Amino acid sequence: MIQAHQLNFDNGEYVFFNIDLFSSQNATAQAWHRPEDTDERNAHARAAYESLMTVSLRKPTSNAYEEFSQEVRDKSAAIYTNFTAIDEEVGVIVNSFVGAFHDAIILYALALNDTIEGGGDITDGHSITARMWNRSFNGITGTVSIDKNGDRNVDYSLLDLNTDTDRFEVVADYFGNNKQYTPFKGRSIRWPGGRARAPPDTPVCGFDNSKCPPEEPFPDYVIVIIVLGSTLLIVLIVTFFVYREKGCKGVKEKTTWEERDDIMFEGPTQNGKKMDKNKPHVSRKNSYHSDCSADTIAVHLNDVGNRQLFTKTGYYKGAILAIKPITRTHISITKPLLVEIKKMKDLQNDHLVRFHGVCIDIPNQCILTEYCPKGSLQDVLENDQIKLDWMFRYSIMQDIVRGMTYLHSTDIKSHGHLKSSNCVVDSRFVVKITDFGLHYFKEKEEELVEDTYAIERSKLWMAPELLRMTNPCCCGTQKGDVYSFAIICQEIVYRNGAFYLQNLDLSPKEITDKLRKGSRPLFRPTLEEFDCPNDELARVVRRCWAEEPSERPDFQALRTMIKKLNKGGRRRERKGRGDILDNLLTRMELLPPYPFLEALVEERTADYLQEKKKAEELLYNMLPKSIALQLIRRESIAAEWYDGVTIYFSDICGFTALSAASTPMQVVDLLNDLYTVFDSIVEHFDVYKVETIGDAYMVVSGLPARNGNLHAREIARMSLALLDNVFRFKIRHRPGDQLKLRIGIHSGPVCAGVVGLKMPRYCLFGDTVNTSSRMESNGLPLRIHVSPCTHEILQQFGTFHLEMRGPVEMKGKGVVTTYWLLGEEGSAYNIRQQGCNEPASAAAAAATTAETSANNATPPTSSTTVATVTSTDGASSPKNTSASSSPNANAKRSPPPPPPPSTSLSSSSSPQHH
């Protein structure tokens, strides 16, 4: 409090609260006084204590409590000879804890009596404690109130300093039972500073006195410091401008940027003869005629008509240079422009196009840069005749990253117009970046372009935050360059132009409008993991085009990321620092002349890619595509748990008898025709075909790609479509017979994973598989048997027609109420239309029983579960469900073991045998 007094916090604008719950009233008498301290400090403390209030526990004042206190004193003095804990000023009043202990015993006794009266156990602490909560009673300390959490609603007193008696006295009480604040009768709070009410929340001058001007002007020493500082600042500013003037003058004198020698804008030949460089006959700035270099990739591929960009070229000092016309009609040479040109001349990097100079003579105003004869990266990517494997694509990305890393580390800072057309390829197939810097010469380019489509197309590489600006800076930003690099990477992956959108045709204007809106989910070009050589590349590209610029990595970090991805395409040391193509070119130079070598390499590469594609498509037919891609990349595949899938099982009733009456070739033809029809139907639904064993057919939806609750809908629609086609299916060797398909579906959780490395199988494990098989085996021909779990999910869609079958006894499940799926509203597939909505007759049920009994005569494969069902018409149907997909399905085996707790079926690459 003395410190508060020294800081003038006791001026009436602040009030301090002291929490002292158990202090005696001795502490309230001149609590600010310290006998061992000086009178001055005691006086300061006395003044500060006027701003202090104390919160303490309220002490009872009833006669009963005084008598209780007296008894406590008497017993304490009789028991303890050294009893001195008595407050002399308050006489018999004792510590508040004593009364609290007394009331606690009473509370326990009340709760114990209630427990006994209620027939409870007196040793049940939880029951007794629960009876203490939400309870009130009159104790020795007054009204005792316990809330619903078991806490006591305590009473408090507010003490304030009486300036007349120098003692703290109670000025108000707070009663916790009824949450009521009651001022003490005859007393009031003495607010500090003579105030009649509490001070405001914020002092008049603010907490730092910033709202009040100083009472006195600045001291003399402050004025001297300000004057000297201002003088020094002025001197520094003048010195800076003088130095800058001299420096720019020296830069202008030493600058070699302005090319004044002869520039030949025409081709290097005239009248079919090579021009002699020693002759004075040259064309000096007379035209912009330019032929495409013979080294351009498109020329070699006889694809001149498909080239997107043309580069104007010219001869200067015996070298071919690229010429970029300047669209500005008036060029003003300023000091900032001279400095920027000097910086451009100083840039030297293997992945940046070399800047040679500027020609400002009218009408041939242009920028001269290094010429890269292989064309732009955009031309290379959009030319389908150029085959680029991922080693070359990674090298392209790595070249761009190295060039941008260097550019961002220089005074140029950023590119601003990074796109595939501004990445050119030199004669050594090294990608270099061009069209950076010198934005003064490019400011009017967009205004002179009348083709709005071309303007919007050039913005496909621009970052969304720049698109939303009314007048974005032409120099761009470093994070904007990272976004542009991501768009270029997507071009490299798909080679379908900038901002390729699969199954979506939008104009550049529509694309840029969507980017400006920035709606969620973010609008970005197509990029799938399975289209990239690995998932890490897709993650890097998505980080680069993140909506928030701060979330995008810089090119220094990208350099490390791309280098890790390009493990086989790192640069090797060969006569200095060479590109990945150098080793390949060196080996080709050592080969004897062979005019058809390039065509042969292309042919063999195309054959290899075609065979690789066939092998991958075959693998995709045996395993889910995402799983197959992981296996191709030799990645480990962990088993995965799926909370909700729907499994479809079906078989053919009477298949045993039909097989006995048919030749093996006829049976194979029958199954091939049937499953060819089934496979063509399955392709139209979000399902995955797991297995076919003989006449059994298994399909699942909801894995490996989760689809919420849509798995039940997809399986139901597929079942209706399959059953509809079965009615129209004709058996070749027995066209008059009707094929009887029996279907069962069930929904629930499963575990799925790949088992084995050689001939791997994608297997499903769990009780859901077993229950699905029992639903099929307990069904009826030409009917779709639905479990209660699947029925509950289908009811959420409100479009499916289902009919209750009734209770069905299932082995291991007990009595289960199942349903028939009859059709879907608005669907062409409706079982009612086929005349199958009535229950099967007793004869049909008996025939079904005989058929399933005949099926049981065939030994099962590995684990077997036998289920018997009693249908509503009394028919019984046992059925075997195989738990694995082994090629030797009908091999002779010993009697089946007891049924396992779950059934698993797998997707196998082995052939099927009947």
Image (cartoon, rainbow, N blue to C red):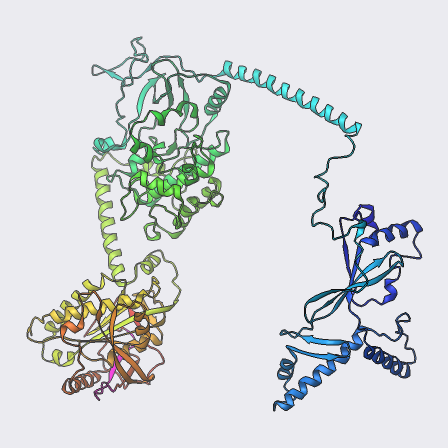
- Residue 184 appears in the figure: yes
For residue 818, side relative to residue 185 (left or right): left
Q: Is residue 844 above or below residue 422?
A: below
Q: Main secondary structure of the magenta part?
A: loop
Residue drawn at x 30%, y 26% as measured from the top left: 311
Residue drawn at x 35%, y 64% as measured from the top left: 708
The residue nearer to you, when weighing 852 against 546, is 546
Residue 431 location (% of width, % of height): 37, 34
Residue 502 location (% of width, % of height): 28, 48
For residue 764, side relative to residue 600 (left or right): right
When asked about the image quadrant of residue 315, the answer is top left
Can residue 624 be found in the magenta stretch? no
Residue 858 location (% of width, % of height): 21, 82
For residue 866, side relative to residue 565 (left or right): left
Residue drawn at x 29%, y 18% as measured from the top left: 288
Q: Is residue 253 above or below residue 895?
A: above
When asked about the image quadrant of residue 691, the answer is bottom left
Q: Magenta region: which residues?
A: 870-884
